[in-house]
Image: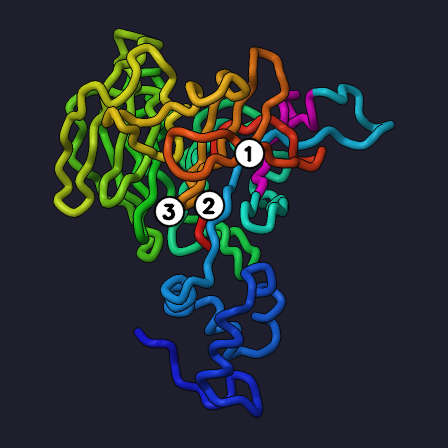
């Protein structure tokens, strides 16, 4: 479908110029602009307009992070170091959004079903400029959930998507075009999985994919080009023994292939977030880049940049850095407001 013709997108201006003005609106203004009139709302919320903005270079890539929420203000706070608690006493988590271009931070409104905090260990993906939250553990019962929620940055609303086909924890996730891909993890009996599924955001439906060749619990998902990489993980019988390979799905053909030696054996694969390939043909481990991020390392690819998070030692405060380009070069420290200094569990890039 094409963007509909309307001679007065902005009264008094030619159609092309009016559309150009709306195309240049920053995403932060879309929520307010969509309330001006019905034609603007229909335009700003359409997939066609999103693709038009992206093709003309007016979208930007932001990092969405599952992050521990800040502690409540005194005197209500009892434990100022651990942040707000969910009803069972565990730390609450929300979604922080970091724009590396403007160096600004914001926090999304909570999911209505989980007002006290996100499901623990939930996973994030993105499609068509929208954020997708999947799975995790109920913050009250600690039981795995199959919930899927979609956040629209234009409307600033959460909507509920079709539930995951089955309960799984610590699975790999990656996004490509209008689909989110998941694979591996473990079921309720802590049995490692080799099954994989794709969620189509436009159709709000799940499709089962060909299984991987082996079980992969606590694996990491990254998308490189037209491939979904499921990195490392371990089988049911080898708890915690991370393997050194990866299994790669060709999204076009739906076929898997093994890539031996893609990762360092025994190393947690979360440090490969962002999906960069080094000169040696292996995935880059951000934990090896600098001693400042060698513990609890996370990475979120933002186009040519990567947001890298980590600590110098166990118990140290997690720092955030921007890395330009490939594997070499220094990290640029990011100034983070106090309310966004909580521990980051995971994250993804959303182009909005």
**What's the colour scheme?**
rainbow
To which residue does mark 3 refer? Answer: 162
Question: Is any part of residue 137 visible from this angle?
Answer: no
Residue at x 51% of width, y 82% of height: 18
Residue 274 pos. (x, y %): 39, 35
Q: Callout 1 environment at 10 Å: few (<14), some (14 to 19), or many (20+)?
A: few
To which residue does mark 1 refer? Answer: 332
Q: Nearer the viewer, residue 186 or 108?
A: 108
Q: Nearer the viewer, residue 276 or 221?
A: 276
Q: Where does the magenta region start and end?
A: 82-97
Residue at x 27% of width, y 12% of height: 236
Provide the major secondary structure of the magenta segment: loop
- Element under disc 2: strand
Asked which quadrant contains residue 96, the reply is top right
> Is residue 103 found inside the magenta-colored segment of the image?
no
Tell me the CA gap for discs 3 and 2: 8 Å
Residue 121 pos. (x, y %): 48, 27
- Element under disc 3: loop
To which residue does mark 2 refer? Answer: 149
Viewer-nearest of labels 3 and 2? 2
């Amino acid at each position: 479908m094409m963007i509909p013709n309307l001679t007065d997108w902005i009264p008094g201006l030619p159609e092309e110029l009016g559309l150009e003005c709306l195309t240049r609106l920053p995403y932060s203004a879309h929520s307010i602009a969509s309330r001006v009139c019905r034609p603007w709302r229909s335009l700003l919320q359409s997939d066609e307009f999103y693709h038009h903005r992206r093709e003309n270079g007016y979208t930007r890539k932001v990092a969405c992070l599952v992050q521990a929420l800040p502690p409540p203000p005194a005197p209500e706070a009892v434990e100022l170091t651990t942040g707000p608690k969910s009803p069972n006493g565990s730390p609450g988590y929300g979604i922080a959004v970091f724009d590396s271009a403007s160096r600004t931070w914001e926090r999304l409104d909570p999911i209505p079903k989980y007002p006290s905090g996100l499901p623990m260990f939930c996973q994030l993906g993105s499609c068509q400029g929208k954020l997708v939250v999947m799975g995790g553990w109920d913050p009250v019962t600690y039981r795995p959930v199959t919930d899927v929620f979609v956040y629209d940055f234009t409307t600033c609303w959460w909507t509920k998507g079709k539930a995951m086909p089955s309960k799984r924890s610590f699975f790999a996730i990656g996004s490509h075009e209008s689909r989110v891909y998941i694979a591996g993890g473990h079921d309720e009996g802590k049995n490692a999985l080799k099954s994989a599924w794709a969620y189509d955001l436009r159709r709000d439906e799940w499709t089962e994919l060909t299984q991987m060749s082996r079980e992969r619990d606590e694996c990491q998902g990254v998308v490189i080009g037209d491939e979904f990489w499921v990195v490392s993980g371990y089988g049911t019988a080898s708890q915690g023994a991370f393997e050194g390979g990866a299994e790669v799905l060709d999204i076009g053909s739906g076929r898997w292939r093994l890539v031996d030696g893609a990762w360092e054996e025994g190393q947690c694969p979360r440090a490969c977030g962002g999906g960069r390939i080094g000169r040696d043909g292996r995935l880059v481990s951000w934990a090896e880049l600098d001693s400042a991020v060698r513990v609890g390392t996370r990475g979120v690819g933002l186009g040519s940049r990567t947001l890298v998070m980590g600590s110098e030692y166990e118990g140290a405060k997690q720092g955030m850095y921007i890395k330009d380009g490939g594997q070499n070069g220094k990290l640029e420290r990011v100034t983070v407001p106090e309310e966004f200094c909580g521990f980051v569990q995971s994250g993804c890039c959303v182009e909005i």
